[in-house]
Image (spheres, helix red, strand yellow):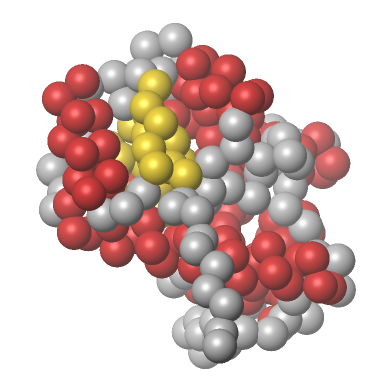
Amino acid sequence: MKETVEQEAPKLLLIDDDPNLILLVQDYLEFQGYQVTTVDNGKEALETLEEEIPDLIICDIMMPEMDGYELVERIREDSRISWIPVIFLSAKGQPNDRVKGLNTGADVYLIKPFEPEELVAQVESSLRQANRFLERSQSNGGFAEEGEKIEVPEGVTLTRTETKVVQFVAQGLANREIAEKLDVSQRTVESHVSNMLNKTRLHNRTELARWAIQSHLAH
């Protein structure tokens, strides 16, 4: 007779200053079986993260006290929580807004209004990806090369500086840390990451890091 182990529902941290959106999204996610903690700004989110570490963060960008950009930068700089997937929710839908969000360290950028089913699909996808990375990190002491091959357009080449930047991205460093190591501004690093995302047509820093490792750029 097989012994079954009941898994605890994934814990999500939802951050938004719109109480109506908080109620709607929280109700929908809890109906889907997730545990949801809510706060209404980035400062409260950091205080919550001191007490409890969620499996995934869903975050608005424009908020009082501390906006989503600063929050994600702070998260990516803290090794205790830097691995947590972050989904940005934003009414700002221009391509440069999306690029900035992904460059800051978000894994997914969803534009408001969005379908609840799409949010749940992104949550499930991000959780699966985070679990794969955590398993590989524990068994290999860091990022691994195994897994689905990351495809980029043929003939993609990086400048010497871009290669240095992507090596640091693959090590899990935030843009601010990379800027300090290369003695350049954070905006310069963001520009390099943006250029590489455009060249490779990848969606986020996680895919960029995997591609760098699979292509032996990060060794």
Residue 218 in view here: no
Residue 147 image-quadrant placement: bottom right
Q: Position of residue 174 (x, y in %)?
A: 68, 43
Q: Is residue 78 above or below residue 163?
A: above
Q: What residue do we see at 36% from left, 19% from top?
A: 40
Q: Position of residue 38 (x, y in %)?
A: 37, 27
Q: Judge left or right: residue 219 versus residue 198.
A: right
Q: What residue do we see at 26% from left, 54% from top?
A: 32
Residue 28 in view here: yes
Q: What residue do we see at 86% from left, 66% from top?
A: 141
Q: Position of residue 161 (x, y in %)?
A: 74, 57
Q: Is residue 111 above or below residue 218?
A: above
Q: Position of residue 167 (x, y in %)?
A: 77, 62
User: Which residue in the rendered view is the most extreme toward the top?
Assistant: 65
- In the picture, the quarter occupied by the C terminus is bottom right
- In the picture, the quarter occupied by the N terminus is bottom right
Mark count: 0
Compare residues 178 and 172 and report the one nearer the observer: 172
Residue 159 image-quadrant placement: bottom right
Compare residues 74 and 12 and report the one nearer the observer: 12
